[in-house]
Image (cartoon, helix red, strand yellow):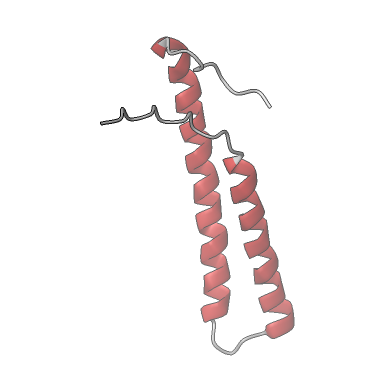
Amino acid sequence: MSERRPDPPPLRTRDTLTILTGTVLWAVALVVVLVVVRPADTRLVWTCVAGVGLGLFGLLFVRRRDARVRDAAPASGLPGSEPHRP
């Protein structure tokens, strides 16, 4: 039998930038729907509003998560646990 290889280290990603980009795209879609399409049925409007709202929630969630990880990392003493600086 072969031994299991260790898990690779987690990838460093820019979650805040990704979520912010999606939120801005939902906001643009909302403006387009309100100005250009002017739908009689408001489902398109509420879909865009929900996209913006969930994006803002995602930004809050990710920033709080990153802050908790950054605060807990020095106390853990694990190698490679220092804060990420771009």
Decide if residue 78 is on the left or right side of residue 59.
left
Q: Residue furthest right?
A: 36
Q: Position of residue 36 (x, y in %)?
A: 74, 81
Q: Residue 55: name its quadrant.
A: bottom right
Asked if 69 appears above or below 62 in the picture, the reply is: above
Residue 83: x %, y % from top left: 56, 20
Report the number of numbered marks.
0
As rendered, which of 67 and 40 lies closer to the eye?
A: 67
| Residue at the (66%, 53%) spot, across then down | 21
- Residue at 62 percent across and 86 percent down: it is 39
In the rendered image, the vertical position of residue 54 relative to residue 81, given as above or below: below
Quadrant location of the N terminus in the rendered image: top left
- Residue at image coords 73%, 78%: 35
Classify residue 41 as left or right of residue 26: left
The foreground one among 20 and 82 is: 82
Q: Could you tell me residue 17's position as x and y percent?
A: 65, 44
